Amino acid sequence: MSEYLKPLPEADEASQPFWDGAMEGRLVLMKCSDCGQWRLPARAHCDNCLSDKYTWETASGRGTVRTFGVMWQKYQPGWAAETPYNVTIVELEEGPRLPTNVIGIPNDQITVGMPVRVDFEKHDDVALPKFRPS
């Protein structure tokens, strides 16, 4: 296996449960205990009701492509072998939107509104949520 050259995220205290879930193959998000609103990224208060009460829950992992772009420029050397690659915003079934990549399909076949499901790209100590057509 070749060395992974792209930058990888590092969990902080607020996002640790998200990244722990990803390593287990689960998409884990904050959910307001008072109104049920899902939130991403993790933050102290609910945008809907301002409650500071929440739980971490496993989301369905299903969503739709909200928008995307195809990157042809090599802004960071780690992506050189994959250029062109897509940068996609997936709207999760639960509501939050997640910046990611759609994998398992050529870039020219990605469409807005396409149903997708989460898949995880695992590395030594982090798993990245990517999405495949469902």
Image (cartoon, grey):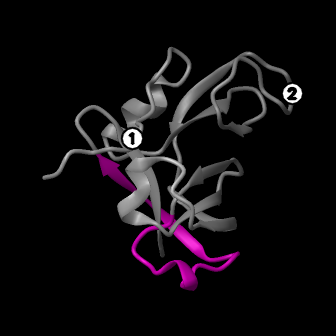
Tell me the magenta residue range: 102-122
Q: Is residue 92 left or right of residue 125?
A: right
Establish if 5 lies above or below 15. below
Residue 105: horizontal and vertical position, in percent? 44, 79
Cβ atoms under marks 1 and 2 closer than 8 Å:
no
Please name the residue shown 54% across and 50% down the image: 75
Counting the numbered discs, the total is: 2
Residue at 46% in and 66% down: 83
Residue at 76%, 26% in the rendered image: 34
The percent position of residue 132, horizontal first and vertical second, equals 45, 69
Please state if 27 lies on the left or on the right of 30 as rendered.
left
| Residue 126 against residue 55 in the figure, above or below | below
Q: Residue flagged by tag 2: what amino acid is it?
A: Cys
Residue picked out by circle 2:
49
Numbered mark located on residue 22 in the image: 1
Q: Give me the C-alpha separation between circle 1 and circle 2.
A: 27 Å
Q: Residue furthest right?
A: 49
State the image coordinates of residue 11 (x, y, percent, origin top left).
45, 23
Residue 53 point in image, percent of width and height: 69, 18
Report whether 4 appears left or right of 39. left
Residue type at tag 1:
Ala
Q: Is residue 87 visible?
A: yes
Mark 1, other Cα within 10 Å: few <14 / some 14–19 / many ≥20: many
Quarter of the rendering containing residue 110: bottom right
Q: Is residue 101 left or right of residue 2?
A: right
Q: Is residue 36 above or below residue 109?
A: above
State yes or no: residue 103 in magenta.
yes
Residue appearing at x 69%, y 75% in the figure: 113
